[in-house]
Image (cartoon, helix red, strand yellow):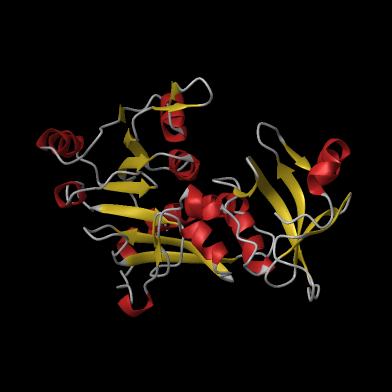
Amino acid sequence: MNPIQPLKIVFAGTPTFAATALQAILSSHHQVIAVYTQPDRPAGRGRKLTASPVKELALHHSLPIHQPISLRDIEQLTILQELQADIMVVAAYGLILPPAILQAPRLGCINIHASLLPRWRGAAPIQRAILVSDKKTGITIMQMEKGLDTGAMLYKVECAIESTDTSEILHDRLAAMGSSAILTTLNQLPNLTPEIQNETLVTYAHKITKEEAELNWHSPAIELERKIRAFNPWPVAFFRDGEQVIRIWDATVIEQSLNHHAPGEILQANANGIDIATEKNVLRLLKIQLSGGRMLPVADILNARQNDFKVGKIL
């Protein structure tokens, strides 16, 4: 049941995940009175200053926009207090909210988090869930407090992680779920009972680094395949062939005995894919990207670069 009066909401977020939630709130009976988002950043080959997806949406709706570098000074606290918001909704904002900021709105701040807390607190819950082969994930709406994703949980919804999910696919599914979950939370806020997180079940989703995306053929094929899905579309899994960096966008595991083949050995290269021996089973590369090139199906690349992937070569 919706509250009798719409809530006056300050929204804080930056990427597409957050913009999806903002759009849902804008389409509801609640009132977004201001938007906070990260400062414009250089992007693309020209390094042109680019607005975040949340800012683009806020501009489209002529909403007041704030882009502070930090929220730690008294001036920012005063600005937020003067808005007299009922609540702040936060989704992938990217700035730390000090205790004074968290307490400024009448009902505090709530966060849309892309995991089933307390599992995967932190920066990269979607990628980490795929990397360790979790079978399910979801959205948690939680009250915000000083700790990293430590607040009491208000509402949770879960979904399966499919064996073919990339981070991009799972991100989009969770973004849609998050937009629905935040509306449910806002509409039922007076009736929700906060649930304290079980600290014995906590895991941390540490930030992803580019270095993690390099494949080691002395790992089982199934682990490498999960890396490829987890790091698609960023930073993209890769391996080195001499001076060339080859990115892998899609691959599959082929169960095969490897009695006399070394990890990293090319077993076959044809229109079906490039088969590479690993510590256990074979990784078949399906879509790759050569240095300076576009992502293409292996069959298209082999038409011009067959000699780069000769059978028996050790990568």
Q: Quadrant of residue 220?
A: bottom right
Query: Foreground: 304 or 186?
Result: 304
Q: Is residue 19 above or below residue 208?
A: above
Query: Foreground: 300 or 159?
Result: 300
The N terminus: image quadrant: bottom left
Q: Position of residue 82 (x, y in %)?
A: 16, 35
Q: Position of residue 281 (x, y in %)?
A: 74, 71
Q: Residue at x 45, y 28 (%)?
A: 56
Left or right: residue 275 compared with residue 205: right
Q: Quadrant of residue 131?
A: bottom right
Q: Residue at x 32, y 36 (%)?
A: 36
Q: Position of residue 83 (x, y in %)?
A: 21, 35
Q: Position of residue 112 (x, y in %)?
A: 40, 54
Left or right: residue 110 compared with residue 241: left
Query: Foreground: 138 or 169?
Result: 169
Confirm whether residue 158 shows in the render: no
Q: Residue at x 50, y 19 (%)?
A: 46
How many labels were placed on the picture?
0
Confirm whether residue 15 shows in the render: yes
Q: Is residue 5 above or below residue 221?
A: above
Q: Residue at x 34, y 48 (%)?
A: 89
Left or right: residue 165 compared with residue 34: right
Residue extending furthest bottom?
A: 200
The C terminus: image quadrant: bottom right
